[in-house]
Image (tube, rainbow, N blue to C red):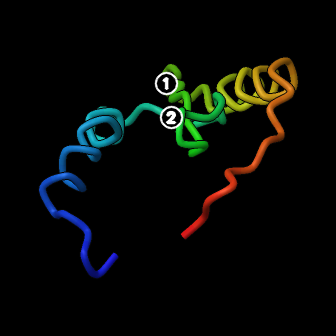
Amino acid sequence: MANADPVQMYLNDVFTVTVNLAGLPGISVPAGLDRQGLPLGLQLIGRPWEEGDLLNVAYSLERAAGFLAKPAKWW
C-alpha cells in the first residue's frame, strides 16, 4: 500500500460511503474473476434494520454461484 494512489483509493470509496452514510446494511459477495484472474465482487444493499434478510440473500447467492476459485496472483 506504500505506493497506492490516494485518488484511486478515494474513488473506490465512492461505491461504499454513500450506503454507510445512509445507514443501510451492505455486503459484498464473490462474483467471479476478471481477465487477469483477480476477484470481482457484487455489492448488495439492504433495507434499514434488515441485516438478517441481506445475509440470507448473500448466502443464497454464494451457494447458487458455487464460486470457489482463488486468484492465481496475490500480493
Quarter of the N terminus within the rendering: bottom left
Residue drawn 65% across the image and 26% down it: 54
Kind of residue at badge 2: Gly
Q: Dot 1 lies on which element?
A: strand
Q: Is residue 40 left or right of residue 58?
A: left
Mark 1 → mark 2, Cα distance in angstroms: 4 Å
Question: Circles 1 and 2: CB distance less than 8 Å?
Answer: yes
Kind of residue at badge 1: Ile
Percent coordinates x, y for residue 69 in the rendering: 79, 42
- The relative height of residue 34 versus residue 65 in the rendered view (above or below) is below
Q: Is residue 39 left or right of residue 70?
A: left
- Residue located beneath label 1 in the image: 45
**Nearer the observer, 39 or 14:** 39
Which one is earlier in the sequence, the residue at label 1 or at label 2?
2
Question: Number of callouts in the render?
Answer: 2
Report which quarter residue 72 is drawn in. bottom right
Q: Is residue 63 left or right of residue 57?
A: right
Which residue appears farthest toward the front when viewing the image? 36
- Residue located beneath label 2 in the image: 26
Report which quarter residue 66 is drawn in. top right
**Nearer the observer, 6 or 74:** 74
**Nearer the observer, 30 or 53:** 30
